Image: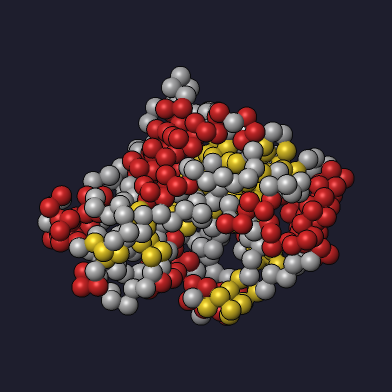
Amino acid sequence: MHRALYTAAVQPHTLALDASLRHCRTAFELLDTMHTGKSEFHVEAPQRLERGGRFKARLTAYYLPQFHRLEVNDRAWGSGFTEWTNVTRTQPFFPGHLQPHLPADLGFYDLTNADVMRRQIDLALHYGVTGFCFYHYWFAGRTIMDGPVRLFQQLADPDMEFCLCWANENWSRRWENAEDDVIIRQEHSVERDRLFIHDILPYLRNDRYRRIEGRKLLLVYIPEALGAGLHDTVAYWRRIAREEGVGELAVMGTSFPSRHAFRDEPAIDGIVQFPPHRGFRGTVRIRPEQMLNTKFKGRIDDYGQTIAHLESVDYGHDRVIPGVFPAWDNSARKRERSHIFINTDPLAFERWLRHAIAKALQNPRTDGLVFINAWNEWAEGAHLEPCRWYGHAHLAACRRALLASEPTAHVPPQ
């Protein structure tokens, strides 16, 4: 997104795009730049990928495993569906709207290919991202999309850690705004939810499973979905982990709006920020005549104002792992009802990440962890992986932010 096009978009109001063009190049020049596929922030790929050194801050990126063919998706969406199906069909809604998001170095990959994951790991480690947090889709004994995390374990790269986030919500056709059209229902009960720990024991036993203060870190996407059985369920998980030789668990929730309800809940060991949830500030309205698609009924927010708001949120817990996102635009999934952030760019992301790293290093209870949403959420416009517009710019921002946090750290040259 070209920042200057939206310099006036800082308060809820109707924005005339033609008035803001005084601050930048002409609209035709801007669109021509978009056509070339490279922005002014574009960073080229390094000639060699060296490991990125050791830092006290530990960057962990959420990892979406849906970039391969699945029988359940074939039945629900049509033969051959993957996440790329959504990504490639997207079109811009207004001048300067960066769509579609298209991959650069890794192309339209298939996550059943071990070479793809090796390249992802090499990229991450070069820029200082030392962990992936895989979404784990488990439905009362049925697991789907676990092929990529199993492949990750087989590769056994000693420098790259991982953890799991139980995506404990319904698998629905929400990408077509049909929340009630459930493909696989997530039915919670104490009896069912207790079984989850047995499914993930092989991952928890892995020496490269990510820890916080010596305990294996397990995220639950929506802890309150476990209802009144949350405490008993988590207590059972902890007991089984000890009995099976895994050791102690650190069970943490992500930052949904009602997370303050866990202020006094002993089952939860902390919160992992999951932006842009609990954000959404600086709403911008664009005149209908300026829209490229007049059917747009979604929402547009300002990145900078959202960051400022998220920094002030009280999550009701003294252990809050900072989280950041490089950009957000889920047009590929929601289409005309999408949520888009403007005024995003790698430099703004880097400033926020530097602040998040500083917070993590100042709070001993976070053990230096910072989460990034995400490594490869291409259909939500939230990805560190190189794209045609920015190249390696967001990854380079991670490396610079880490270097700024520890200027004396030993880091191999680019």
Q: Position of residue 322 (x, y in %)?
A: 54, 41
For residue 22, side relative to residue 46 (left or right) = left
Q: How many marks?
A: 0
Q: Residue at x 65, y 33 (%)?
A: 365
Is residue 260 visible to us here? Answer: yes
Looking at the image, is 374 positioned above or below residue 311?
Answer: below
Q: Position of residue 151 (x, y in %)?
A: 62, 53
Q: Position of residue 152 (x, y in %)?
A: 61, 50
For residue 164, side relative to residue 126 (left or right) = right
**The N terminus lies in which quarter of the figure?**
bottom left
Is residue 374 visible to us here? Answer: no
For residue 17, side relative to residue 150 (left or right) = left
**The C terminus lies in which quarter of the figure?**
top left
Seen from the viewer's position, the closer of residues 330 and 311 is 311
Q: Image quadrant of residue 242?
A: top right
Q: Residue at x 63, y 51 (%)?
A: 260
Seen from the viewer's position, the closer of residues 183 and 208 is 183
For residue 97, side relative to residue 268 (left or right) = left
Q: Image quadrant of residue 32?
A: bottom left
Looking at the image, is 68 positioned above or below residue 248?
Answer: below
Seen from the viewer's position, the closer of residues 86 and 367 is 367
Looking at the image, is 237 positioned above or below residue 299?
Answer: above
Q: Residue at x 34, y 73 (%)?
A: 296
